[in-house]
Image (tube, rainbow, N blue to C red):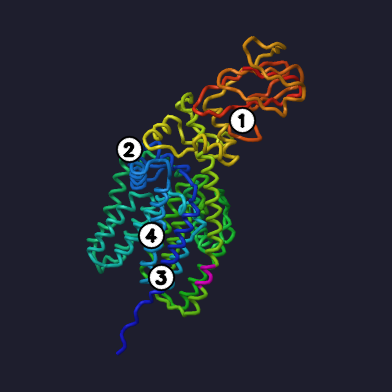
Amino acid sequence: MNPPAQPSRAPILLLGVALVAAAGVLIAAQWHVTFFQDTFAFLLDRQDWSAASFFDPHNEHIVVIPVLITKVLLEVFGMSSNVPEQIAMGITVLTAPVLLFIWLRRRVGEWLALIAAVLFLFLGSAWPVIIWPFENEFTLPICFGLGMLIFLDREDTKGDAWACVMLVLASISGSLGLPFIALAFFDVVLKHRERGWRRAFVFAVPLFVYLVWYAGYGHEAEKHLTLHNILHSPAYVVEGFASALDSLAGLSTIPVNSPGQNDWGRPLLIGAIALVGFAQWRRPGIPRGFWPVAAAGVIYWLLAALNFVPGREASASRYVYAGALFVLLMAAELAREWRFSRNTLLVIGALALLAIGPNLAQMKEGADFEKQQSVYTRSDLGALEIARDTVAPSFTLAGVETTGTASLSIVEAQKYFEAVDRWGSPAHTEAGLESAPPEGRHFADIVLAAALPISHETVPEFDQSASSGEACATMQPGEAQGKEIPVEPGATRVEVGPGPAAAIGMRRFAEGEFPVQIAAVEGGTTTTLQIPKDRAKKQWYVNVQAAQLVRVCR
């Protein structure tokens, strides 16, 4: 009698290789990236260790564990770098495909499990979730939810207990825990004849935890439930599944950080439905395990539909990550009774490799976007710190025309300085600003002028003679446009002789341009600039675009 065949080690080894490669991709994608967008809500608005810091919703979401991770990392490593945050996020990004592989291989075998796990690992069209640490409110519930599924496969009381623990952790990590609670509910219902209702605690305990949070804190969150959202929710759910298929196939056409519709999602969804129909014709019967994961997927997209606002389209990059997971779970349950030939597996593997290429390209585009945002973040925060002595406590880094980015609108000066005093600064120093990319120096000058603030007053007079004790630079007609005059903190007078209108601009860290446009003034006027003293040594420079006589006096 021959011994039973041993499982091949090759899929596990290849998964290990893929994980190492993915770690390298994550390092490259996050190199020189700093804190971004909603992360500042955790850094600045939840600085103390109060109950509100942990339990207040972010938007409408529960974020207890993400806040805990942020606070622990801040206490240990400070705020000068977000590399610890990236590492913590990377652990969840690499763990989820491993757990997915473990769950899938019992259903479809190791090779199909490997293909699905690697597709999920390199799902670059969901780049915000993969390379932005704040999105662990997606990756944490997915890791805990997959852990729950693995424990449920044990089909025993101990497995149910651990599944409940995983589900509690998922439910306090993000709202994505709710679809997993629904999954557990349907699992209990479908198996109640064999295992009874005593297993109801698996979903009841985490649901109770969530409802307690909602009663105490979650009900205060902004709501977006409207009749429009209710009526459009079926279309949104369909679009959600279509977008997930589109992303898994490497065919997403959604631009980075922009809304849009996928060109291939709906045809792929129609094709998938047709394929399932053909499979049912060949071998009727849908496995019982399909219904809980399908219900979880529908509920995930349905909750997103009911809370829709512009920017939360079903095709948005940050939403397709979980959607793709539910599609893979559903596909595995549908295929669990099928056996595939070696050639079929080779074809599926080749198609998966073809899908990974475009996904990696999208991940690079997302990484480039975040790196560009990091240039603005470090530069604008550096300018804010230079102006610390005079900036208004309520000053915010709002307005793309001022900061170059919309991702800093929640940064308020007083809260930011409190965080810096506690944990250090992620901003550019003065030396860092001097070597920053041109766009960073450009907006640093604009932010600095607004934060100090530099003020001016123009009066309709022009005095040909300088006052005693003044240091003046005089430019003859036509000479001013190509010159820049260094100025010091305090009052500086810009006199524009009679003639056409002129424009006064300033720069400090920028080179070859004058980003700070002070005023457009009429000829025959005098403008007094008030420049507060700040924490940088570098001089300001004034330029006057004028065709007539100009005098700049300190």
Q: Residues within 10 Å of mark 4 (few under 14, many from 20)?
A: some
* Secondary structure, magenta segment, majority class: helix
Depth check, mark 4 against mark 2: the one in front is: 4
- Residue 416 visible in the current orientation: yes
Residue under numbered circle 4: 95
Amino acid type for the residue under numbered disc 3: Leu
Q: Residue at x 56, y 61 (%)?
A: 358
Spatial CA span between label 1 and label 3: 57 Å
User: Is the Cβ of the residue at disc 4 closer than 8 Å to that at disc 2?
Assistant: no
Q: Residue at x 52, y 25 (%)?
A: 452
Residue under numbered circle 2: 52
Which of pointers 2 and 3 lies earlier in the amino acid sequence?
3
Which of pointers 2 and 1 lies earlier in the amino acid sequence?
2
Chain part drawn in magenta: 348-353
Depth check, mark 4 against mark 1: the one in front is: 1
Which of pointers 4 and 2 lies earlier in the amino acid sequence?
2
Residue under numbered circle 1: 507
* Residue 281, x across and y down, in percent: 47, 76
Q: Of helix, strand and loop, which one carries label 2?
A: helix
Q: Residue at x 50, y 51 (%)?
A: 232
Residue under numbered circle 3: 13
User: Is the Cβ of the residue at disc 4 closer than 8 Å to that at disc 3?
Assistant: no
* Residue 238, x across and y down, in percent: 50, 58
Query: Vertical placement of 306 versus 271: above or below?
Result: above
